[in-house]
Image (cartoon, grey):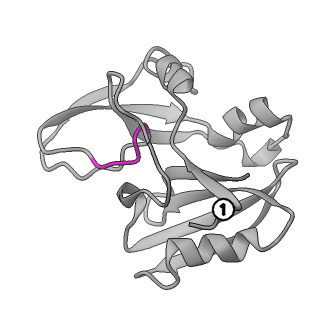
Amino acid sequence: MDESYEMRAIAPEVLKQLRITDDAGDPPRLVVEDEEGGNPMRCCLGRSRPHETIALVSYAPLRRWARETGATPGPYNEVGPVFIHPEECDGWTGPGIADGIRGRRRVLRAYTAEGNILGGRLLNDGEPTIEEGLAELYGDPRVAAVHVRAVEFGCFLAETRRV
């Protein structure tokens, strides 16, 4: 992995809050038994197991990032659904790119340190790879963070940050 950035799951202290009240101000709306498994988990960047109980919560990744960094995401302050384990899990231990976020179609969204969207990159059937797309985006010194998202639903999968 390129050493100019690191992959991050949702932080344990944030997960603790989301399990009580999510970023839309609601308790976890849905706790389901995942029949087939395979849903991307944002707490550990893995995939759910068949018949595992998972929680669906609203999460605002740029809002959380802005609180830490002083950025102002303004109109990019999206809130969307993410799956997490309803109880504490092992989390993401890195390094590298978590296999749980890989997929056929992904989009990378790059943000400046001020919280503005700077650009993006579509990843289609592994072309380019996540690693190649991130290296390309982080080649621009203005990029402070890049989010990995699913194309079909636009769901937030993981955050990377410049180190």
- Which residue is at 55% across, 59% downward? 148
Residue 134 visible in this rendered orientation of the protein? yes
Near-viewer residue (134 or 149): 134
Report the amino acid beneath label 1: Glu
Secondary structure mostly taken by the magenta-highlighted segment of the chain: loop
Q: Quadrant of the N terminus?
A: bottom right
Residue 22 visible in this rendered orientation of the protein? no
Image height of 94 relative to 25, above or below: below
**Which residue is labeled 1 in the image?**
3
- Which residue is at 52% across, 71% downward? 130
Q: Which residue is the extreme one toward the top?
A: 20
- Which residue is at 41% across, 36% downward? 91
Q: Position of residue 77 (x, y in %)?
A: 71, 42
Specify whether residue 123 is painted magenta.
Answer: no
Near-viewer residue (22 or 42): 42
In the rendered structure, the answer to whether residue 91 lies left or right of residue 117 reads left
Highlighted range, magenta: 43-47
In the rendered structure, the answer to whether residue 111 lies left or right of residue 160 reads right
Q: Position of residue 24 (x, y in %)?
A: 56, 26
Near-viewer residue (52 or 155): 52
Image height of 9 relative to 127, above or below: above
Q: Position of residue 132 (x, y in %)?
A: 58, 78
Q: Secondary structure at mark 1?
A: loop
Q: Position of residue 23 (x, y in %)?
A: 58, 27
Q: Quadrant of residue 136?
A: bottom right
Image height of 23 relative to 80, above or below: above
Q: Quadrant of residue 54?
A: top left
Mark 1, residues whose alpha carbon is within 10 Å: few (<14), some, or many (≥20)? few
In the rendered structure, the answer to whether residue 159 lies left or right of residue 18 reads right
In the rendered structure, the answer to whether residue 101 lies left or right of residue 109 reads left
